[in-house]
Image (spheres, rainbow, N blue to C red):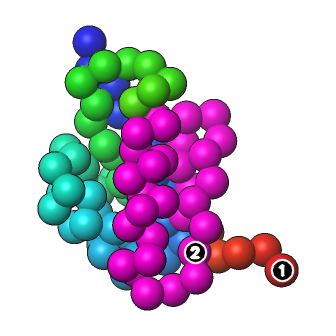
Amino acid sequence: MSSTIQVEAARIPDRNTLLELLKEHGLDARSHNEMGIEVLCAEESGAAADEVFSEVSGLIMNIGAPFVPIKHEGVVYVRPPVG
C-alpha cells in the first residue's frame, strides 16, 4: 500500500525549487496547496518518512538559503533557523 509524505516549505519559491530537486532525484513529488509538497511512497512506514527527510536534508543546500528541515509527526517542515 502506498502513502504520501508531506513536505512544507517556508516560501513558494523554495517549494518550487525543492519540488524540482526531489523529482530530479527520482522521487514521485507533486505540489500540494500553496506551500506543500506530497511525496508518494511505495510503502507506508516511518522508514519512508525518514528517507524523504534524508533526501530533503541533502537538497537544502541547493535552495541557496539557510533552511533547516524538521520532521514532526510524519511531516517534513523546511524552515529558516530559529535564532
Q: In the image, is residue 21 above or below residue 2?
A: below
Measure the C-alpha gap from mark 1 to mark 2: 12 Å
Q: Which residues are magenta?
A: 49-78
Residue at image coords 26%, 58%: 22
- Whether 52 is among the magenta residues is yes
Q: Quadrant of the N terminus?
A: top left
The x and y percentages for residue 51 are: 41, 39
Q: Secondary structure at mark 2?
A: loop
The x and y percentages for residue 39 are: 31, 43
- Whether 7 is among the magenta residues is no
Q: Which class describes the residues within 10 Å of circle 2: few (<14), some (14-19), or many (20+)?
A: some
Identify the image quadrant of residue 52: top left
Q: In the image, is residue 82 above or below residue 35?
A: below
- Numbered tag placed on residue 49 in the rendering: none
Residue 80 or residue 35, whichever sits in front: 80
Q: Quadrant of the C terminus?
A: bottom right
User: In the rendered image, which residue does mark 2 sit on?
Assistant: 67
Residue at image coords 61%, 46%: 71
Q: In the image, is residue 73 above or below residue 13?
A: above
Q: In the image, is residue 56 above or below residue 51?
A: below
Three-letter code for the amino acid on which mark 2 is drawn: Phe
Residue at image coords 33%, 25%: 3
- Numbered tag placed on residue 83 in the rendering: 1
The x and y percentages for residue 62 are: 36, 79
Residue 73 or residue 51, whichever sits in front: 51
Q: Is residue 12 visible?
A: no
Q: Is residue 45 left or right of residue 30?
A: right
Three-letter code for the amino acid on which mark 1 is drawn: Gly
Q: Is residue 54 visible?
A: yes
